Image (cartoon, rainbow, N blue to C red):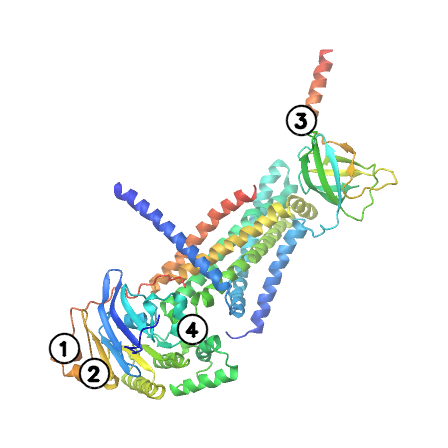
Amino acid sequence: MTVSSLDDAPVVFSDVDMAFEKRHVLRAFSCRFAAGKISVILGGSGSGKTTILRLIGGLVRPQRGRIVVAGEDISRLSETQMYSVRCKLGMMFQGGALLDSLTIFDNLAFPLREHTSMSENEIAAEVHRQLAAVGLSDVDDLLPGQLSGGMIRRAALARAIVRKPEILLCDEPFSGLDPISVKRIEALLRRINRQLGVTMLVSSHHIPSTLRMADQVVLLLGDRAVSGSPAELCQSTDARIAGFLNEEVDESIEPPAYAGSHRFAAP
Amino acid sequence: MITLVQDLGAGVLQFIAHLGRITRFGASVVRAALTRPNRVRIFVSELFNLGVLSLVIICVCGLAVGMVLGLQGYNTLVRFGAEQSLGAVVGLSLIRELGPVLTALLATGRAGSATTAEIGTMVATEQLDGLRMMSINPIHLVVMPKTFAMVCVMPLLSALFIVFGLGGGYLVGVVLMGVDGGVYISSLQSAVDYYDDVAGSLLKALVFGVLVGLIATYRGYTCAPTSAGVSSATTSTVVVGSVSVLIFDYFITALWGV
Amino acid sequence: MSRSPARDFVVGLFVLAGLGAIAYLSMNVGGFSFRRAGGLVVYASFDQTGGLKARAPVVISGVKVGQVDSIGLDKNFRARVEMSLDHNLQIPADTSASIVTAGLLGDRYISLQLGGEDKYLKSGDEITMTESAVILERLIGKLIHSTDVQKSE
């Protein structure tokens, strides 16, 4: 079911409620993510950043509300129908989520072998191109377990863009990295956004890089969400926003007991 | 007292809900098997993981069980002067019951728990979500080949268990206890009928393969994405798998004789 | 999915070993055989089968030549046995069939004693001369009865 083009933003949330068991993560959440821009979803632990990305990917379903991704209302789609929507998405997971029984080469080649009819030579060329683009070389025959954290993230990023998606979702790409690796990944993300024109949604709690690279920031403050450009947020007079950006501890945001209930969804 | 009854009722309803869920899971596995692409390479790899890697435990245990049967059988039969029927006793026990059941229990412990742990770890490290985001059905890629491999492997392992068991019985009865080798084999051959005994044994092994395959993959697939979740799912596979095998064993035995 | 020819070979060996074990148990131990088509089907009626079962062997001079297919009652309430024999056999029409026991307490089977006629049985023919099974309890009963009779004389 496609939406009439009054609103042609690639990702639109309308009045979305999301709760795990009894814990409400999102309440009446509405947001537009602009095409071709880098949007950063900022918030503390358990505020719902990763949940928003998982909602876009259809990995969890909202209790209420509408989510439009690339023109389709995905809150009504079945799992099988989601597969075609996901062809336009790429997701870079926090832990990489690479298949640990396959080499890095096979991990990147996997979606190409599965969904395209490219020859092995073409696939090899494309994989090597993407690995070079993220600055990884000579990792073809290594297993994910043999890579460092930063290298796994970059390989995961390469895998996420190997199918040339319209929308790239990055779940906490900076968490747990040293400052140099953070800058490196930040530069990579900006370059990919410029070169491929891909819409990027990044969830993060790393404030400096957010303010540097975001075109739009969505700040999750527990009971409400605030959206704006980095400049607008920095100049905000709201005590809570200023407090967050100055990295003060916000006691009202509870840490998650168990985030991400996993129910078996029939395809 | 009332809460006890309430808990019992809740438990029954939960059990029925679980049965429903695992049946739907099984249906989606079958549906996946009918969809392209085929996963033959992974299937063969799983035959190795579940079958070949279980060979040592199956053959050793088969031999041991056969030897015990030979010993116990001989000691009991010799009291009635019927030690000539040792081949029949060892053979029928192994083929009808001990072969398929013990193989299934051993396979649940070894191959079943390994499968649950593997799939559970993939859930915990978001690998299955990664597959979904690449528009790949994790049931098609991961669950289906493992389940079908388990179904195919079980009759093969069961037959090997039985053959090693017959050998163990021969070793004890003929070589150690002095029963005549020819009498052992001929009593075995005359007592065992293909339709009554062997076919039922193979059917049991197939059914157990389906049970263990589905339970192991289901537990892994639905486990909580934490390391405690994986460990609890693995233990659950062994417990639920073993109990199911024994219960189904009764029903198949009862129905096959009809 | 890296290819490993060594692993494939081992899996192949495993499958062969397993199938071999199944074949051994089915045919060698369990007596399964493929010879079914083109059997010579003959019938025989008995007063008493004594527990003869389907798939019991049919034997000539101690050699198995066929098996019992089914047992039913005919309109005279006699047991009608259908058996299929090796189609290469030429069995005279006056052959007799008797139900005998393997050992004293073993399973029942059918033994054929060949006649001398020139005409041979065709598929669907009836063996007319039959000898029913001996029931051990009746035999003992008769023995007790005859000793009682002797005593009372």
- Answer with mark 2 or mark 4, whichever residue precedes in sequence: 4
Specify whether B181 is left or right of B209. right
How many numbered marks appear? 4
Q: Nearer the viewer, residue B48 or C81?
A: C81
Specify whether C84 is left or right of C119. left
Are the residues under marks 1 and 2 on the same chain?
A: yes
User: Could you tell me which chain the residue with mark 1 belongs to?
Assistant: A
Q: Residues within 10 Å of mark 1 (few under 14, many from 20)?
A: few
Specify whether B219 is left or right of A180. right
Are the residues under marks 1 and 3 on the same chain?
A: no
Are the residues under marks 2 and 4 on the same chain?
A: yes
User: Could you tell me which chain the residue with mark 3 belongs to?
Assistant: C
Q: Are marks 1 and 3 in contact (CB under 8 Å)?
A: no
Q: Are marks 4 and 1 in contact (CB under 8 Å)?
A: no
Say the numbered circle drawn on residue A229: 2
Residue C135 position (above or below residue A134): above
Q: Name the kind of residue labelled 4 in the image.
A: Asp
Q: Which residue is mark 3?
A: C137
Between circles 1 and 3, the one closer to the viewer is 1
Give the quarter of the image for residue B28: bottom left
Q: Which residue is mark 1?
A: A243
The percent coordinates of residue C31 (x first, y second) are 68, 49
Between circles 2 and 4, the one closer to the viewer is 2
Q: Which residue is mark 4?
A: A100
Q: Secondary structure at mark 2?
A: loop
